[in-house]
């Protein structure tokens, strides 16, 4: 989810949208969408948004992207099941978490994170 939010934000800001608008569209409205899905499933969410937004939901993804995402999810699940994820995480901790901490710091510097605390819609 984090990568999708950042990719959407980057796409909009690179296209010239104000960062505040991109933040609102890609991160702030996510809770609304998730709440609608939680309340009644995907069909309820689609019913609750505009027809244009619903059409965007249908046309915004291709089977190719879905298949690639599913393959990546299967790979991650396999790493969890076979213990390699846990092993790598234990090794990372034994080394003092250098990769984890560097990633955390890099992620905290992303423009959407810099904007978020200052943006109260």
Image (cartoon, rainbow, N blue to C red):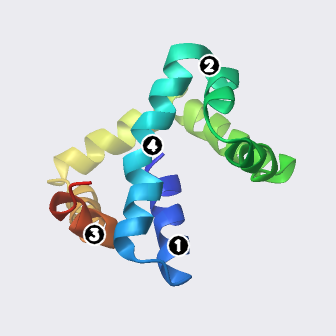
Residue depth check, mark 4 versus mark 3: number of the one nearer the observer? 4
Decide: is 63 above or below 24. above
How far, Cα to Cα, is label 1 from label 2?
A: 27 Å
> Hey, which quadrant is residue 78 in on the image?
top right
Q: Which residue is mark 2?
A: 41
Mark 3 residue crowding within 10 angstroms, few (<14) / some (14–19) / many (20+):
few
Q: Which residue is mark 4?
A: 30
The mark nearer the N terminus, 4 or 3, is: 4
Q: Position of residue 45 (x, y in %)?
A: 61, 28
* 87 left or right of 116 in image: right
How far, Cα to Cα, is label 2 from label 4?
A: 15 Å
* 111 left or right of 67 in image: left
Residue depth check, mark 3 versus mark 1: number of the one nearer the observer? 1
How far, Cα to Cα, is label 4 from label 1?
A: 15 Å
Q: Which residue is mark 3?
A: 106
Residue extending furthest top? 40
Mark 1 residue crowding within 10 angstroms, few (<14) / some (14–19) / many (20+):
some
The mark nearer the N terminus, 1 or 2, is: 1
Which image quadrant: the C terminus?
Answer: bottom left
The mark nearer the N terminus, 2 or 4, is: 4
């Amino acid at each position: 989810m984090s990568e999708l939010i950042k990719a959407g934000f980057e796409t909009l800001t690179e296209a010239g949208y104000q960062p505040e608008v991109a933040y609102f569209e890609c991160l702030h409205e996510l809770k609304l969408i998730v709440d609608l899905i939680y309340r009644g499933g995907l069909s309820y969410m689609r019913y609750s948004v505009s027809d244009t937004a619903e059409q965007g939901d249908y046309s915004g993804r291709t089977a190719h992207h879905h298949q690639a995402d599913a393959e990546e999810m299967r790979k991650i699940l396999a790493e969890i099941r076979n213990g390699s994820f846990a092993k790598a995480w234990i090794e990372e901790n034994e080394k003092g978490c250098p990769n984890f901490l560097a990633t955390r710091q890099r992620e905290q510097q992303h423009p959407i994170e810099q904007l978020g605390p200052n943006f109260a819609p």
